[in-house]
Amino acid sequence: MDVKWLSFIPVLNHQHVLQLQCCNLHRKEIKGRIVWARQLGGEVSICKIACYSFEVVRIIQIPDSCVMMTNSLQVKRNREFEEGICLRSQKTIIQSVLVEIISYMPPPSFPVGSSNISSRLFPFLMLTVFFSIWSSVTYDRKALVINGQRRILFSGSIHYPRSTPQMWGSLIQKAKDGGLDAIDTYVFWNVHEPSPGMYNFEGRYDLVRFIKMIQKAGLYVHLRIGPYVCAEWNFGGFPVWLKYVPGISFRTDNEPFMLATQKFTQKIVNMMKNENLFESQGGPIILSQIENEYERVSKAFGAAGHEYVTWAAKMAVGMDTGVPWVMCKEADAPDPVINTCNGFYCDYFSPNKPYKPTLWTETWSGWFTKFGGPIHHRPVQDLAFAVARFIQKGGSFVNYYMYHGGTNFGRTAGGPFITTSYDYDAPIDEYGLIRQPKYGHLKDLHKAIKLCERALLTADPTITSLGNYEKAHVFSSESGDCAAFLSNYNPKSAARVTFNSKHYKLPPWSISILPDCKNAVFNTAKVRVQTSQMQMLPTNVELLSWDTFHEDISSADDGSTISVFGLLEQLNVTRDTSDYLWYTTSVDISSSESFLHQGQLPTLTVQSTGHAMHLFINGHLAGSAFGTQESLRFTFTGNVDLRPGSNKISLLSIAVGLPNNGPHFEMRKTGILGPVVIHGLDQGKRDLSQHKWSYKVGLKGEAMNLGSPNSISSVDWMQGFLAAEKQKPLTWYKTHFDTPEGEEALALDMSSMGKGQVWINGESIGRYWNVYANGNCNGCSYSDTFRPIKCQFGCGNPTQKWYHVPRSWLKPTKNLLVVFEEIGGDASRIALVKRSVKSICAEVSDYHPNIENWHTERDGKSEVLDIPKVSLHCGRGQFISAIKFASFGTPSGTCGSFEHGSCHAPSSLAIFEKKCVGQQECLVTVSNSNFGADPCPNISKTLLVEAVCAPAADATTTRPN
């Protein structure tokens, strides 16, 4: 048998950590360190060895016997496993290791007359020290220290329940390709423990699987256990049953709450330990979070809030994870817990102790959306500016919240009124597709900052004024490293500054990064990467044949109801098992009532604490009312057609997500609490609030589980009546469809419907609501301080029109689509659409810094090769079908509305047509020679181009000869 040995060359690095050199089967070197050893019969036996490449650490676990001879191992490198690596004689390895240690370390001094056992154990003790340094995460004032090294880290939030396991791998890889070092996620208590002691870690909730996939990709993890998470998630992540624990009060010095919190936190920590997922065990978790954005809430609780924070920190640290704990937005975080910043900007932030690092746990990449509100957009120029400001002020950890927002499947959206889409304007969109230019520009930012890492982590900045709004932050280390950040805080005007005898042009509200204090490789306002405009296109699926089933309103007070005098709070009755609660009462009307003869109908007023309501009089819809994002409470007022004798009044109260933040949010009320009053009777008015009311939780279709393929036949569906059923309330629709070809992301266009919920093959897509967006959508500028209302889109259109359909939920044929419509809609116009790139735009100036052109000579000197280029790239399965606009000179405008300027190279369009049409991607150098003679000498020029993307079959037919 041809055995390939894994050889070791022990070396001590500058941090005095034992370092080994490992060679794989192909004799390519990958570094490694011994991380754990034990003593057997007087000899030291190595039981764990860490081999890593490209800063990706992997622990090799040697069998329990610790027999080192010819043990077959697996070493993961570049995401592939290489098998058959064996170790040489343990005696040879140990001897060489001990020789090296003794030769590098000062000789020990032992007391006179002491046993030579101490001297024999000294090498083993030294190994133990080294091992503990290697498998550790600590911190100092500059940064997190991972395995003895300070690190600048970029992280991104990806919440595992907001995507599918089939999407996780692609999302994680895109995050890594985008320059991230870590993935951040909350842990969502309410999905993991829906009932006390009953746990669920399956499917989208498989937390361990998600973390192991991150580990497999070679990234770190920040695990935010909470267990309160906010996150615009239903009830802030708390299970609703927690509200009903006797004597409980959330998030304060309350024993029932603290006991429950500790139990769940310990559950998660133990799960991670059992799988060796903390970095101290060789896993990827380098940070954990306890509590979440508590500072504002703490003030409401006073001394009890401070006691609770102290307890929470002590409880978490006592779980001995071997990694630091953080508290975000909590200035009083007790040692050793690190307090961190959340916000749109955090350059103002400092930790509460000088020996703690400056960490930004939520860099808000956009903002969430509520039904009835517009879509928020944060320009990437401002986001990059905020990150660069934070880094130049000494920050060393940046986590984008969100990096991929995903979807609030089922009834997980909180708020209330949080949309089913949690896209968040993140670098990776709701469907898992890259959002350009946000993704690419941040990737360039990460590259530029990483080039400065050594200087940033070993030096403090020297700050020099370059003008009224301009500054230079210079990091110069004793070893000769130098990095500079040149900033212009003026939101309106560009600046020309002089630094180190060179001139630099700084756009408004921007920072240029100089990794060598000479060459600008990146500017936060100069976007090099393309902009992609997305579109929704029809698929070949037609949803024409629908069956219907109507909710029986008369069953709202059947035998499964409860009856009491007075109005009950909704959550206390439903316990969040459904969005829906029926309130039903009867009213007797005398035949002598004047309105029965004169024709002026009485009115009914209903006051509700939220969130929506439909009124039925004797089984017929009489009106609806809704709260808004500004005011959850609302009052319904409308005429009611009452008849002589007994009249049934049925109020269907609807929750649209439970509250998720603020002090005592568990005490906020939902539902109809009155008064409920009839006006216009002969006696004046009649208050029904203290009448006998019947309550029924949920709908008949929910009880029959009509969204599931296994239960779809439990009711009699009507066929062929779709045309007559348009606009009829409380209707269930079902149809079947085959999965469309291709790999594009899919969605349902629900703009023809009113309000309700959707299921595909038993999986809940979530709530839909065709409510129109109110707000100010009057343009957007990247410069100056960002707020969500600054850049809004979609005013006057439905807040959410498309609802994500994960392809992994589909079968090749006969997929079951079920819709429950509350108000009424036209199901025949529901459409399955696919998401694709519509057009791509790029802007490159002849003065653009280009991180891709950064070059380091062999002698260590840096150089920027000044060759600007424009890159265009259509989506997968697409090609460039046409060039809509191209101009090199002084063009202007934004993607989709470019215009020629006074200076224009006539050959611009022809050059791009020849180079790009019919290709999936193309690269064009921006230079006078490439576009003919200089169209306007002595003037800075810009290239603007817009290309149209089309499916491959369409694109190739339009390429010029």
Image (tube, rainbow, N blue to C red):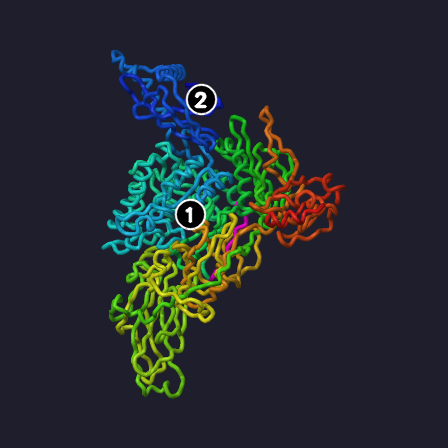
On the question of residue 609 being in view, the answer is: no
Q: Secondary structure at mark 2?
A: strand
* Residues at discs 2 and 1 in contact (Cβ within 8 Å): no
Disc 2 marks a residue whose amino acid type is Gln
Disc 1 marks a residue whose amino acid type is Thr
Q: Which residue is denoted by mark 2 in the rendering?
A: 21
Indicate the quadrant where residue 146 lies.
top left
Give me the residue at 40% from left, 14% from top: 103
Q: Secondary structure at mark 1?
A: loop
* Foreground disc of the pair 2, 1: 1
* Label 2 vs 1, first from the N-terminus: 2
Q: In the image, residue 104 lies at what x, y percent? A: 41, 17
Residue range in magenta is 372-383
Q: Residues within 10 Å of mark 1 (few under 14, many from 20)?
A: some
Q: Which residue is denoted by mark 1 in the rendering?
A: 164
Asked if residue 30 is among those painted magenta in the image, a careful observer would answer no
Residue 689 vs 749, above or below: the answer is below
Q: In the image, residue 133 lies at what x, y percent? A: 37, 27
- Give the quadrant of the N terminus: top left
